[in-house]
Image (cartoon, coloured by chain):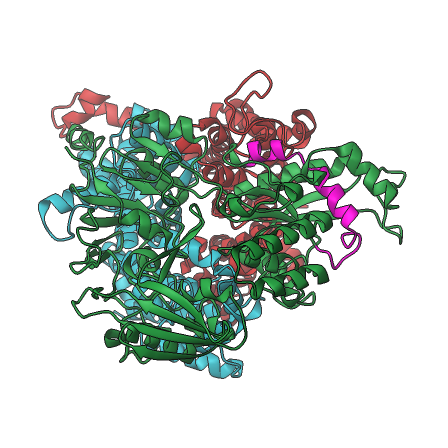
Chain colours: A cyan, B red, C green
Amino acid sequence: MRYLLGRLGFYLLAGWAALTLNFFLPRLMPGDPATALFARFRGRLGPEAVQALREAFGLTDAPLWSQYLTSLGHVARGDLGISVAYFPAPVSQVIGNGLPWTLFLAGTAVVVSFTLGTLLGVAAAWWRGGWVDTLLPPILAFLGAFPYFWLAMVMLYVLGFQWGLFPLGHAYGDDLTPGWSLAFLADVWRHAALPMGSIVLATVGGWMLGMRNTMISVLGSDYVALARAKGLAPSRVVLRYAARNALLPSVTGFGMAIGFVLGGSLLTEIVFSYPGQGYLLVQAVRNQDYPLMQGIFLVITLAVLAANWLVDLVHVWLDPRTREVAP
Amino acid sequence: MSAAAPRAGGVAAWWEAVRRDRKASLGAGLLAFFLLLGLVGPWLAGPADALVGVPLQPPSAAHWLGTTGQGQDVLAQAVAGTRVSLLIGFGVGAAVVLVGALMGVTAGYFGGRVDGLLSLVFNVFLVLPGLPLAIVIAAYLPAGPATVALVLVITGWAWNARVLRAQTLMLRQRDFIAAAVVSGESHLRIITRELLPNMTSLLVAQLIGSTVHAIGAQVGLEFLGLGDVSAVTWGTNLYWATNDSALLTGAWWTFVPTGLCVALVGFALAMLNSAFDELGNPRLRLERAWRTWLLGHRHPPARSTPVVVTRD
Amino acid sequence: MLAGLVASAACVRERPPAPPGVLTVSQEQEASWVRNFNPLSSAAVPRWPTWSGIYEPLYVFSAVRGELIPWLATATEWRDGHRRLRISTRAGVRWSDGQPFGARDVAFTFELLRRFPALDRRGVWGYLTGVELVDAGTVDLTFARVFLPGLEDVVAQLIVPEHAWRGVADPVGFANETPVATGPFTEVRVFRHQVFELGRNPHYWQPGLPKVEALRFPAYPSNERANLALVFGEADWAANFVPAIDRVFVARSPKHHAYWFPLTGSTIFLYANTGRPPFDDPRVRKALSLAIDRDLLVEVALYRYSRPADATGLSDAYAGWRDPVAAGADWTRHDVARASALLDEAGHRRGPDGLRRLPDGRPWRYEIMAVSGWSDWVRAAQVIARGLRELGVDATVRTYDYGAWAQRAGEGRFDLSLGWSFEGPTPYTFYRWLMSRATVKPEGTASLSNWHRYASPEADRLLEAFEREPDPAGQRRLATALQRVFAAEAPAIPLYPNPSWAEYNTSRFQGFPTAARPYADPSPNKFDRGETLLVLTALEPRPR
């Protein structure tokens, strides 16, 4: 428990760091949202209107520390400000539209990739020198070397565009009403298949290789040798003893990977016009929509932190030692 | 002096491993090819951003890989991109390892409060999602390769620091370090002469890993248009390919060559890394022992996994 | 499992079409929809077609036809020596909630604009002094001075219902999620982040219209994605840039896939900063223009969707105004030899390295500024750079993000830049933003246009006369004179008129404007003065 609480404290600290970074970054750099906004209207806006807008956006000249405190207070209340590009929609509303989809896509992809990769890793360690061990790693390493979004582009082009096997974008068909109906869920999966597939393809090799290598190290360790010597069946040795222990580094890596995959999935989303945060973030950047950009970064960070904490829970479950040791 | 021998031995052993290992020689060969391409290619392939013909022409004798949506030669672009992208990739990789080593070794070696503070910093950096952070920072800086490099260093060093700290902590317990400390050698000397040489293989592995990551992340950022889109790099090539509707016009030649370049370099580095990994961890190569053990269970009646038999 | 996946996916190829009568439109490119139907606020971009489909103006202006078409108003009349504009509103128009529309709503809307400058998109209160309700069908606008071009802006105003907007405390930040309007499509049937639908206005004032039952808008985040939707028959009507359109789009279904790109967009210019030498010299600007191979430019940059501009700079939106003499000026042809001679004659000699020199000895080394990602511009800039290099100018293309570009252009911090023109129903607005002293700001101060900082006293005189000229023949004479000033001075270097992008799929709907039947501009982008209303009310489902 102390361990988990300690980790929680750490994540809170990290969250605060992200918030602070978020606040000071834009203020240290040049640029002015009102100018960007002004520009976006291609001159349909007079100077009086621009001045009126500045006020509407609350671009005040208050001292930095008071702005900082105000912003912390707002975030604490879940108020992320007003989007410049989607004025007058609040940032939280703009983000809220796409967030579940990003979490769904990245979350499922990382879990699928992790599970598949780990199983393949165990299989590779089990059948050393078999085709899983010799053929798959170089192929997956090669695929993993492609940028996510490039694989996504090729898959979209071949499977979606040329062969017409998959929808070309979006999270579900435009004719369906979101709900828990079977048709809708099936449609969601079909739409997620390609984006998810490209992420899994690009990342599964890493999990597999990692698991395989740790497995082999673990299999060479004394306690496994002992188990072997005691005459336990290989399957029992490999799965109950070796795999469980070899999983630990992978689980630690899992926490790290969530952030990485979330980042990568932003790119994939753009290729598949998946309605998540990816395109929104890029658009926010292009429009110099600071509030939206910061909001997305903050929300993604918080999601990653939360996921990491969940991973810690799993870690504690897998490794009893952490239950006693303070952080 | 004590370190000179193992280091030389290390290099020789690696070279030997590269020469003998199929994977490693493949990786090294590919990498050498791309380095050479980056070095001399731009002179051979001609100017990359010149307008050479009608946009989106398929590969032909005049333009081996066709032309882009901007009417530029795809081959020349891929080659020119190689130079910039590898430069940034290796540059960022080295910088990331350097910063990581500085922070990680300092934390591990000095321990105590220094360790607590530094560990906290890099652990925080580690949990902040890298690409979104990179995008946000890059958004505020003037677009260009320097920005991309800086952003990637900022978001990339923490993992190395953490691994090197752990390694340092481990080495710190070893006798020869303790001996050096007792004999009154300076911290700097111990770190540079005793600690770092003993981590060479780890540092090389990190350099390779960081470079792969840097190339990928750089391509990703530039694909989003966050780089200087008028520069010619692999990332901007892909950016322009999508911008000029490569998929729609069926102009596969505008994005396949660059994607392959990125993947081949990444693959070459991964092969090298895995070869070095096996060198550093000989257990990974102990196939025979395991094979015989597992196979040995093929015939005894006590076998519980028929799968093994049918598949092996 | 894989087999099942493939089997279930195989039927995707022919996606179920939108229900009959539902027209799928692609105009905006967004990752996800944000609900906003505020037609007035200049701070927000409301969902298309808020400006030209949900809400309606008093008059629709069609650039293709070159005429004002009475819409919510039936007539205008100048009184008091052109200081008072009397507007008669159409009788029998109802708001979508059934309440009657009237002159009160018009008066209310203009009052709202006065109270909230951020709603006054066209800046009409810069010359208006008051608005008076005369009776239920008549409203008077009073002008501070005689300013006839103001009429076109005033009647383009979208009208909002008084009864629904009276209680809105902050109309600038008002999202107007459930619009009450007079347009053909007012009922939000579905609004989700990746698609929304607008149904027919039950009380639309044109009997039997619209024939289309509903409009559907899937969110396509990029041009690429929107193009895929178009090519696969998902979108029925679009305003996309489609490369190699005959091969990519039309050839897939020659019977139904069609496009028409009338050249009625704004003209794309190469702006030379006339506040900086050597660009203050008209001979230099003409020489630069002569060095540009516009034929190559429209081929490389625009797939030949446009044509080289002439020396009036006018697009086809002003076809009826064009003066053949001015258009015949030769400085928009491609003639490098003459360009060189012109520069030599002006005393801009080449240095030993072949580059021309400023009087202080600096070589002519200039960046051509373009916007990152706007590939047509970047390609155009590259063709220009190539031409200028032949002339002894070390020209390079430099791209900036849109925001940075707009800032630099607005503040005049550039030597050479690509840019667009400002359009109005007559050449008055166009030339005002190109040559009027009133639009010149000092370098460093942001300006809406006239980025090249050019003023011509002669043009000012003509523009002022135009503001007071009610007679069409007189207007034409002044417009001709303006064109000749432009052709003589070359304040900016016209490259090509922008096409108005419009693609359509006639397999499910018919009645789109075509070159053979040019009843309106075909592009969904022509919302600024209500022109898409003409199309929305003309489309009908194809009979089966």
Total count of labels: 0
Please report the bounds of the magenta region as a residue range: C273-301
Query: Hey, which residue is sitting farthest left in the picture?
Result: A181
Q: Is residue B266 magenta?
A: no
Q: Is residue C289 magenta?
A: yes
Residue A103, percent from left and from top: 28, 54
Spot occupied by residue C78 in the image (x, y as percentages of width and height): 45, 69
Q: Quadrant of residue B64?
A: top right
The answer to whether residue C419 is left or right of residue C79 is right
Instruction: Name the spot of residue A31 as percent of width and height, x first.
Output: 56, 66
Q: Is residue B102 visible?
A: no
Residue C32: which quarter of the image?
A: bottom left
**Residue toward you, B71 or C467:** C467
Residue C92 seen = yes
Could you say which is closer to the camera, residue C236 or residue C76?
Answer: C76
Residue C418 percent across, percent down from the top left: 61, 49
Farthest top residue in view: B61
**Does C422 appear above or below C442?**
above
- Which residue: 41% across, 68% down? C77
- Left or right, A142 with reference to C492: left
Decide which of C454, C191 is in the foreground and name it: C454
